[in-house]
Amino acid sequence: MWLRVNNEFRQNSNTREMIFDVSTLISYVSQFMTLLLPGDVISTGTPAGVGLGMSPPHYLRPGDVVNLGIERLGKSQQRIGAWKA
């Protein structure tokens, strides 16, 4: 999994660096919910590199471009817009 903000790498990690391995996570989640279909998602959190953890914190601003990808799954790009009430 990788993530760039305005072409600057913020996150670059893989499942080997997770606290619990994938089979342990699936075993645990399967104890209280049914995984029915290929593509069911288990949210595991995020690798190091989030803006809140930086000193000083770096938050997304209107106009920022976020690119992310997961090997063998795909990639995505979003442009951050301003919130209009």
Image: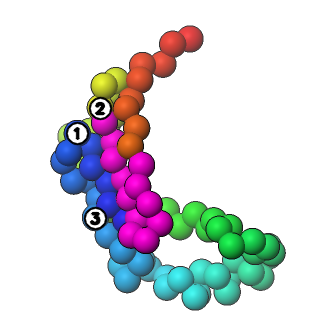
Image coords of residue 85 (percent x, y): 56, 11
Which residues make up the magenta segment?
A: 65-76
Q: Amino acid at mark 3?
A: Asn
Q: Amino acid at mark 1?
A: Asn
Q: Amino acid at mark 2?
A: Asp
For the residues labelled 3 and 1, say whether their Cβ atoms are less than 8 Å apart. Answer: no
Q: Earlier in the sequence, mark 3 or mark 2?
A: 3
Q: Secondary structure at mark 2?
A: loop
Image coords of residue 77 (percent x, y): 38, 43
Instruction: Identify the residue position indicated by label 1 in the image.
Output: 6
Distance CA(mark 3)–CA(mark 1) = 15 Å
Q: Quadrant of residue 70?
A: bottom left
Image coords of residue 5 (percent x, y): 27, 43
Asked if residue 52 shows in the view, the reply is: no
Q: Earlier in the sequence, mark 1 or mark 2?
A: 1
Instruction: Identify the residue position indicated by label 2 in the image.
Output: 64
In this view, the residue farthest toward the top is 85
> What secondary structure is the stretch in magenta mostly built from?
strand
- Is 51 in front, or is 82? 82
For the residues labelled 1 and 2, say whether their Cβ atoms are less than 8 Å apart. Answer: yes
**In this rendering, would 68 be left or right of 73?**
left
Asked if residue 21 shows in the view, the reply is: yes
- Is 15 in front, or is 72? 72
Position of residue 46 relative to residue 26, above or below, is above
Residue 12 bears which disc, if any? 3
Asked whether residue 71 is drawn in magenta, I would say: yes
